[in-house]
Amino acid sequence: MNTSTSDIKKETDRLYEKLNKLGWAREDCESIAPTTLEINQLKVEQNAVILAHSYQTPDIMYGIGDYIGDSYSLSRTATEHPAQKIIFCSVYFMGETAKLLNPDKEVLVPRVAGCSLADSINAEQVRQLRQQYPNAGIVCYVNSYAEVKAESDSCCTSSNVVEVVEAMPQPEIIFIPDKLMGLNLQNMTSKKIITWDGTCVVHEGFNPDTVQDIRNRFPGVKILAHPECAPGVVALVDYAGGTAGMLNYVRESPAKTFMLVTECGLTDRFKAEFKDKKIVGTCILCPYMKEIQLEDVLKALKDPVPEQFITIDEDVAERARTSLSKMFELEKIGKDILNKQAQTL
């Protein structure tokens, strides 16, 4: 790629404008400018779109990402985008979800990164659960591999899990794979929730003492947590929800000080996008998300290896898509059920 000194300066200026809010020096931006410039030129030439999960590093989110968000919303965004190639900067199962929703598009992940939650269960274990609890329905959190989705009755997201579970016909629900989200779910439904022993390495690291300490130190602070955290943490916060819900809460809240009980990438987003808000407290890095580097994205565009391409067995893909489709049907039914319950109170 032919780039001039002027090109590098313009790219450095662009990067610095975005990243200086996060403590990046101009020299830091200048060091990555040749790589981000090449990536951004290649994606245009190849009719590609780059999706960046909110847990990615700032250079990926703000240097090359066309869209930033959570896994499912990004996959949905890709279905409406004209690009025929998707580069998903995320862990592997998220790339699978993008492929399920965009079967005719080429989907690549920069690196084959795992996930403590998704890695906790496989298709055979789901089949064993169905044999063990033959009368129970199986609801699968979207943070799972395609083979697990394929064995489930329905998927769900962190924002629609209650609606989906309420709409399931069975009084007992096997919720996989997140144990802590399942325990939180049990507090929101009268159905019996059977959990699996999977957890997110990030969200299981928070404890109630940390949350309470921040509340004591910063009067008036609003504390937001992901429902993948333990129930003891969720019980102490002002809001529990996924990344999109947290963004909306902060955007609409008159409060000025917040703690985010989640991964550090989301904290970076808030610092960059809400200049008048203050983030306090601690966050925890996801070692899997942080595996992905700019050089990996460049390789996916210039010289991809077979492992970077998302491929899913067609039978598995068809059943997994059925599980995803069922989610929308149940979500609508569940909303009606919850509205009727609220009216009777």
Image: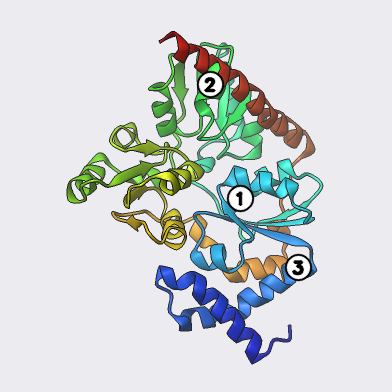
For marks 2 and 1, the one nearer the N-term is 1
Instruction: Characterize the local packing of mark 2: few (<14), some (14-19) or many (20 or more) Cα atoms within 10 angstroms.
Output: many
Question: Does 17 sit above or below residue 286?
Answer: below
Asked which secondary structure carries label 1, the reply is helix
| In this rendering, position of residue 127 left or right of residue 257 | right
Residue closest to the eye, 295 or 78: 78
Instruction: Give residue 119's position: percent from left, percent from top.
Output: 53, 42
**The quadrant where residue 138 appears:** top right
Q: Is residue 132 visible?
A: no
Q: Which mark is residue 92?
A: 1
Instruction: Give residue 255's position: percent from left, percent from top.
Output: 33, 48
Give me the residue at 72% from left, 65% from top. Answer: 304
Instruction: Characterize the local packing of mark 1: few (<14), some (14-19) or many (20 or more) Cα atoms within 10 angstroms.
Output: many
Give me the residue at 57% from left, 69% from top. Answer: 63
Mark 3 residue type: Val
Which residue, as the protein is rendered here, is positioned at the far top?
Answer: 344
State the residue position of label 2: 165
Question: Does 39 sit above or below residue 288?
Answer: below
Give me the residue at 45% from left, 62% from top. Answer: 272
Q: Tell me how far mark 3 sits from mark 2, CA to CA.
A: 42 Å
Mark 2 residue type: Val
Q: Is residue 324 visible?
A: yes
State the residue position of label 3: 44
